[in-house]
Image (spheres, rainbow, N blue to C red):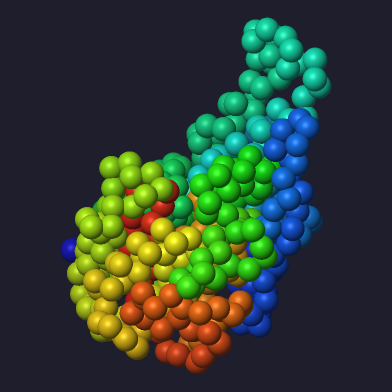
Amino acid sequence: MSERVVITGIGPVTPLGVGKEAAWEALSANRTRVMERELRVDLAEYERAALVPMPAEWHLEDLRDPTLLLAEECAEYRDLRYAIRAMRLAVEDAGLDVDREANGIGAIYAFEAPGMEAMVRHMLSMPPEALMVEQPQLYPFVSKHFYHTHSFFYVHVLGKAMGLHGMSTCVHNACASGAFAIEMAAQQIRSGAAPVMLVAGAEAFETGVRVRYLRGMETYAEGTEMRPFDVSPTGFYVGEGGTALVLEARSHADARGARVYAEYAGGGFAQQSWKHAMPDVPANRLAAASRKAMGDAGVNPGEVDLVVPHGAGSGISDGYEAHTLGELFEKHSRVPMCPLKAYLGHQLGNCVLAELAAGLTMMEHGMVLGQPFDGETNGRVPLELVRSNRQHAVQIMLKLATGFTGHDAAMVFRKG
């Protein structure tokens, strides 16, 4: 019989507050932090865009730890610093005492584009004469930062920061990365390879390059409001932050008397074979993944107490999810639904983990958050889009994710 997997630690570093208590205080007060910021696109052009940024000082993390190599070089990578801070918060929240010299703890990291923002920022800051030389002379300007865009650099730095010795790697499944990371970590625990695994992710925006790309696809919000599943889709704005979760074998957690937030009861995953931004609605692999997750968990749709959807705010993505939910749930179902990107921004590779941390905290407090912006539901979703905070006992939560280029995922969590 395989080990049951539970979550014993939550470490959110959000624009609304650092740590579980501060983040929950802001979420339950329906606060957001959507701002317009000028982001550099190239040497001569800037892009003004709405986003959910972190306060300037909140990414700070002491990188003078002697176990961290290249600390000076990685210090400018705010996503790494968000992730390190989140991991330390999660480990503290779980009450874990990590023996840096001898442990079998591993970690799975969810990053959409590791190091890319720092590399682009560096290239945009190069002197003009560097851009006019032959490529052999250009290489010294970019080589270090090109190296840092490889995920093994992130595995190295984050593993060193925490003193981990178990199986660790990065995953890149677009906006569903966090879900795939959780499943990989859970498989290590279920197989008996590790009693404890960390899952972490982060996102930071230094430049407007990705924003320009998303605007070209007509998925980026032009204003400072995001209204998922709305009759007039707004698109999304990006957000910054870091999140970490501690996953643990139930037997290990019980033996040390750990508090358990929830059990990861089942997961379903699918690929759309490179459908890019246009999901394969007739095939509806997200619905199949959801049925697999609920089957693994031994629950039916009528037993689900809360759905936390991907809720990207675009007509195409929301329409795909609405079609999925229509296949899973009866019309006018009483199950509440709570999209969270309007609060946290779309944190791309970290979005699943950031939203899951908020969902687990809703489960802990027995409350479903309302939406921070008014709107009119498009009528295509069979669930209730909760408009104002509501006390609601959540025993079973379904989290959905659908990533760019066709990464579909569904996860079921059972309280306690």
Q: Residue at position x 22%, y 78% from top?
A: 300
Residue projecting furthest to the bottom: 391
Residue projecting furthest to the front: 232
Does 351 appear above or below 45?
below
Does 180 appear above or below 332?
above
Is residue 51 found left or right of 167 in the rendered image?
right
Is residue 290 found left or right of 42 in the rendered image?
left
How many numbered badges does the structure rendering display?
0
For the question of whether residue 91 can be seen, the reply is: no
Report the front residue among 5 and 411.
Answer: 411
Q: Position of residue 220 (x, y in %)?
A: 57, 54
Q: Position of residue 102 (x, y in %)?
A: 48, 47
Q: Residue at position x 21%, y 75% from top?
A: 298
Q: Position of residue 16 (x, y in %)?
A: 68, 69
Q: Residue at position x 18%, y 63% from top?
A: 1
Is residue 401 found left or right of 386 in the rendered image?
left
Q: Residue at position x 20%, y 69% from top?
A: 295
Is residue 242 found left or right of 168 in the rendered image?
right
Report the front residue among 113 and 226.
Answer: 226
Does 232 appear above or below 114?
below
**Quarter that holds the C terminus:** bottom left
For the question of whether residue 27 can be seen, the reply is: yes
